[in-house]
Amino acid sequence: MKSIHIDYEMAEATLAEADARAGEADAAVAKLYEKDMAFTGWVDYAAHFPEDELSRIERTAAEIAGKCDAFVVIGIGGSYLGARAALSFIDRPDSKKPGAWPEVFFAGFNVSGTYHQRLLDKLEGRDVCVIVISKSGGTLEPSVAFLTLKNYLYNKYGQAGAHERIYAITDAKSGKLKAEADANGYASFVLPSDIGGRYSVLSPVGLLPLAAAGLDIRQMLSGAASAEEPGLVAAAKRFACVRAVLEGQKTVETVSFFDPSVEDFTAWVLQLFGESEGKDGRGVFPAPVGISRDLHSLGQFLQEGRQIFYETLLFVEDPTADITIEGADAGDYAGRSYSEFARAVLEGMAKAHRGVDIPIIRVYIPDNSAYSFGQLVYVFELTCAVTGLLMGVDPFNQPGVEAYKKGMLDYLAQT
Amino acid sequence: MKSIHIDYEMAEATLAEADARAGEADAAVAKLYEKDMAFTGWVDYAAHFPEDELSRIERTAAEIAGKCDAFVVIGIGGSYLGARAALSFIDRPDSKKPGAWPEVFFAGFNVSGTYHQRLLDKLEGRDVCVIVISKSGGTLEPSVAFLTLKNYLYNKYGQAGAHERIYAITDAKSGKLKAEADANGYASFVLPSDIGGRYSVLSPVGLLPLAAAGLDIRQMLSGAASAEEPGLVAAAKRFACVRAVLEGQKTVETVSFFDPSVEDFTAWVLQLFGESEGKDGRGVFPAPVGISRDLHSLGQFLQEGRQIFYETLLFVEDPTADITIEGADAGDYAGRSYSEFARAVLEGMAKAHRGVDIPIIRVYIPDNSAYSFGQLVYVFELTCAVTGLLMGVDPFNQPGVEAYKKGMLDYLAQT
């Protein structure tokens, strides 16, 4: 199968400096594979996924798909961004059949009454299940979303009926959600204690909802396992070295997607990079750019504004669907296809940005398959972890997230 | 009616420096209102919208709504971001009735075969119209989307039937699309020559699709006209002075929305700011942040990463829907409502960010009405234009956008 490959266009001195750090990157990868620090459970998880756990996920997913035509995934940050990215990215053979699989909604990442009311309106007249994802069960946003949805299920199915429609992914032993799941008899899965939220999409956190939505999670795991092969590990190491060097030169990394199917994956990347690397006064701020959309907006800034960027471009080489332009009005475009235009946009943009010396990293993604998605996730996870270690920060903690939580709870206590 | 208001939390020296520029801001506003430069047609457009044009937009919109249950708006940049922002933001009294108004899709801002195939799949079995928006008719992305959709309409309705389902918004006199609209008899509207794309949402560009989707465009125009009153002009001027001063201190402006209904408006702001101010090696790069979502991702970076930010927060004060938390499990949250939690998140985040000296601008939006949307659009347009003039750049051109177009056409010519 074709694999992800990564090309670089930037000053030779930058690449030379990056390549001079290859030994450090080797040491970082060795440290990760030895699990010589907390939260490194993901490094070999896909390749060694326990078959009994995987089978139980698939059986439970089939049960969910049989029971409802819509389900709500409740979670914040890494508890939903990965599943959303996969749903947008991966094409299914039966994607044309509306209703073949339940529709997926997300909640728990905001405290908007408008959002939740609109969500409840969309669920009207449908059979609904809920998958709630929280390590502790204590975070405010998913807690109140879960209370709202639980109330909705209680009114609709009664308490016992509702409990059969709630699935929990939580800590193995402790926490509010674990206690509630045990008391109410929710089917539940363990959120592995050595895998952090933003590295969790290939755990039950992502796999259960994705399987229930009809995606091939075995292919996804195979793709991720394939990225543990030396060639892709080497690619991730070089990507990390280049990013670590650029961190000394630039303050913003634009992460650009050309195909809208990659937009939600981009959001997942932003969390991964931002939360892993933005600490100790360090890091390059990751910002999303949609192509061609933003070439008619932020493109102006990239071309002629303050030069604070480097670019990471996400390009799907062999998209699922291509369309050839036909018709009497087609003129110069007649016989050309979308995939040709996409290449032209990529090359046109790269040429324009080379002209103003923006460093460019091109990540070529083979296709929109579940396998490629798994591979992509792993390459980015490894790249991010190695970049953090090269920068000298812990890529797996997020101490800064507590500050707003504390401020919020203080405010609630006073009002 | 309640109006937008804007609060500032930052160093007193920064605010003093901003207030010292008030005279310059007065001069900038005067220059704009005298239309003493190109592309200033928007400054009094909403307040003086010609009644005959508005009536024709409403009649045509009613015709579109009667003819189809789905329509596709084809445009790039300012030709679609404003309409999309309004559709997400504005609540309609009958929003609960699916099918009361046609569903709106967008195309023309990417060259993805996957995207267009998925779009065509969604249109299957539905009655469809197309609104195509382009000044010249020559830009690649909307041109190929239009060719694809036109082919689809031809196959479905025949050529004559299709022409009755195509609506064009284009130049008054010249260009490929104008010629085609005349030849094929499309109902068409004029894209005002003195209003640029990113300032065009309150022209036919936004008003026709929004009216066809059932929104109250007269309320929207009233809201925009209300923002020409001295109080709101003064608010925009101060906002611009603060932004101009912060441009000397920071490299990234995060634009944060608390309610998901404001997410697409945020994307419109990014275009407005990025394309207007990012030139001559200047500008602060605008990046979107979704709250609470990104407090569990980029929030880490904001709190503890490199301090390159100031923040513009978009907060809806009186959201359309609120939900009170109830139920036996509600614990401490019982009797509390989403709107209280939203305030707590706002105050918690502000406190956390004050603690690390991030300058904060709070934009309070009264509600999700069409009136507030119009007011919001005008306040941001005026703020952006004045900021550009204070920086000494032309906020209405976008010379940098041509570079990728040229590179793209060169590539196509060679392949």
Image (tube, coloured by chain):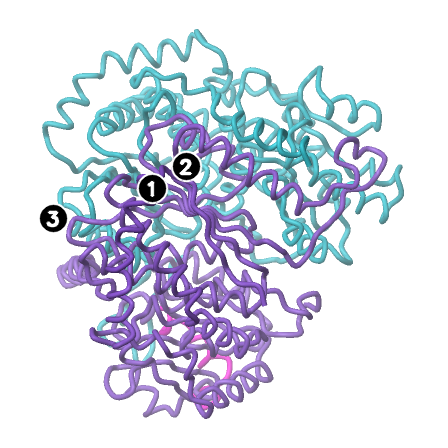
Chain colours: A purple, B cyan
The chain holding disc 1 is B
Estimate the x, y position of residue A101 in percent, counting from the top left: 62, 74
Say the numbered circle drawn on residue B255.
Answer: 1
The reply to whether the C-beta atoms of the residues labelled 2 and 1 are less than 8 Å apart is yes
Q: Can residue B262 be seen in this view?
A: no
**Image point (39%, 62%), residue name:** A234
Secondary structure beneath dot 2 equals helix
Q: As rendered, which of A345 and A122 lies closer to the eye?
A: A345
| Residue A150 drawn in magenta | yes
Q: In this figure, which residue is indicated by the disc labeled 3?
A: B355
Q: Position of residue A27 (x, y in %)?
A: 24, 66
Q: Name the image quarter holding residue B255.
A: top left
Task: Give the mark, 2 or 3, whose residue is nearer the N terminus.
Answer: 2
User: Which image quadrant: the C terminus of chain A?
Assistant: bottom left
Side of A75 where B219 appears, left or right: right
Residue B270 bears which disc, if any? 2
Label 2 to label 3, Cα distance in Å? 26 Å
Return the disc, 2 or 1, that comes first in the chain's sequence.
Answer: 1
Q: What stretch is highlighted in magenta?
A: A145-161
